[in-house]
Image (tube, rainbow, N blue to C red):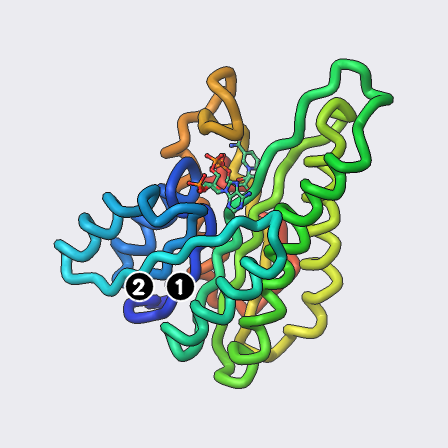
């Protein structure tokens, strides 16, 4: 399995849920971490814990509904690191649940697409050229197994659009040393997943790291974390 000690990671949504689990797992691997949330205070305890272990860790803030903040986040992460090796696009928002499946508001699509699709793609587009130049990179984009739930269509469609980006980019990454894949964490008890979810958040590991540690060079794959739980 790939040794990622000393690799620079930009992890979005590191403060809670899946992101917090992934932050711990990447810290255990000895990565240099850039942890994103909307407010540095949300990741302050992680910083204290990781720095006490001698790890390099930075925190950055960005609200993804504001595209300028997304771009600034990517550029600042590149400035700090000198080149991102691993981009873990985890942050996302859930859309309102509509019992009446015919009333999703246009604004709900716009917000879901900005936060869940445009923001992660923007970060990909900022880091991928440098990765390809250095012939190394791992990008993981968090998707969802959600289907047959038109009550949550703004969320579901935003994830489907992110999937499309990953599938259509895959041929362009062939033989570059850079991979980009999708991870479905499974339905988990987090703020986003809700208390009725069948799986504990801890069950996202070890599967969440599989697309990071893979050495076969393939892109455009869909990984389900629960397959490894
Ligand atoms: N949980 C599930 O059942 C489930 C199922 C399938 C897919 N997923 C996917 O897994 C990923 C993680 O989900 P989760 O359940 O861990 O979510 P979560 O517990 O709600 O955590 C969301 C994270 O994203 C950040 N975030 C929220 N709104 C944001 C915004 N507007 N701009 C920037 N950052 C924002 C939060 O940072 P702050 O600290 O600043 O709030 C937090 O770190 C998401 O991509 C989600 O779609 C989850």
CB of mark 1 near ligand 1 (< 8 Å): no
Image location of residue 111, percent across then percent down: 69, 42
Image location of residue 19, percent across then percent down: 42, 44
Q: Residue at x 44, y 77 (%)?
A: 83
Residue that mark 1 sits on: 9
Mark positioned earlier in the residue sequence (1 or 2): 1
- Could you tell me which quadrant the N terminus lies in? bottom left
Q: Does 106 appear above or below 149?
A: below
Q: Secondary structure at mark 2?
A: loop
Side (left or right) of 32 relative to 121: left
Image location of residue 228, percent across then percent down: 45, 40
Side (left or right) of 193 relative to 23: right
Along the line of sight, which residue is nearer the eye, 71 or 192? 71
- CB atoms at circles 1 and 2 under 8 Å apart? yes
User: Which residue occupies the extreme right position in the image?
Assistant: 102
Q: Residue at x 75, y 14 (%)?
A: 99
Q: Which disc number belongs to residue 217?
A: none
Residue that mark 2 sits on: 31
Q: Residue at x 62, y 38 (%)?
A: 144
Q: Quadrant of residue 18?
A: top left
Q: Does 40 appear above or below 195?
A: below
Image location of residue 133, percent across then percent down: 54, 85
Label 1: few (<14), some (14–19) or many (≥20) C-alpha neighbours in 10 Å? many
Query: Alpha carbon of mark 1 to alpha carbon of mark 2: how far?
Result: 7 Å
Side (left or right) of 217 relative to 114: left
Q: How many numbered callouts?
A: 2
Q: Secondary structure at mark 1?
A: strand
Label 2: few (<14), some (14–19) or many (≥20) C-alpha neighbours in 10 Å? many
**Residue 229 visible somewhere in the drawing:** no
């Amino acid at each position: 399995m790939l040794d990622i000690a000393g690799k620079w990671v930009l992890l979005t949504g590191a403060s809670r849920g899946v992101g917090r689990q992934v932050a711990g797992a990447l810290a255990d691997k000895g990565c240099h971490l850039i942890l994103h949330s909307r407010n540095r205070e949300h990741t302050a305890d992680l910083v204290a814990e990781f720095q006490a272990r001698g790890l390099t860790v930075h925190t950055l803030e960005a609200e993804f509904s504001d595209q300028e903040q997304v771009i600034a986040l990517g550029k600042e992460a590149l400035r700090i690191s000198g080149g991102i090796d691993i981009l873990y696009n985890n942050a996302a928002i859930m859309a309102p649940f509509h019992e009446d499946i015919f009333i999703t508001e246009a604004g709900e699509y716009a917000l879901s697409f900005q936060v869940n699709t445009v923001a992660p793609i923007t970060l990909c587009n900022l880091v991928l050229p440098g990765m390809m130049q250095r012939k190394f990179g791992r990008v993981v984009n968090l998707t969802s197994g959600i289907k047959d739930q038109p009550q949550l269509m703004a969320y579901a469609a935003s994830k489907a659009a992110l999937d499309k980006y990953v599938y259509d980019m895959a041929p362009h990454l062939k033989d570059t040393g850079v991979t980009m894949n999708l991870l479905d964490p499974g339905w988990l008890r987090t703020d986003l997943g809700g208390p009725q979810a069948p799986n504990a958040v801890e069950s996202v590991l070890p599967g969440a790291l599989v697309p990071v540690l893979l050495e076969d060079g393939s892109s455009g794959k869909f990984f389900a974390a629960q397959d490894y739980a």
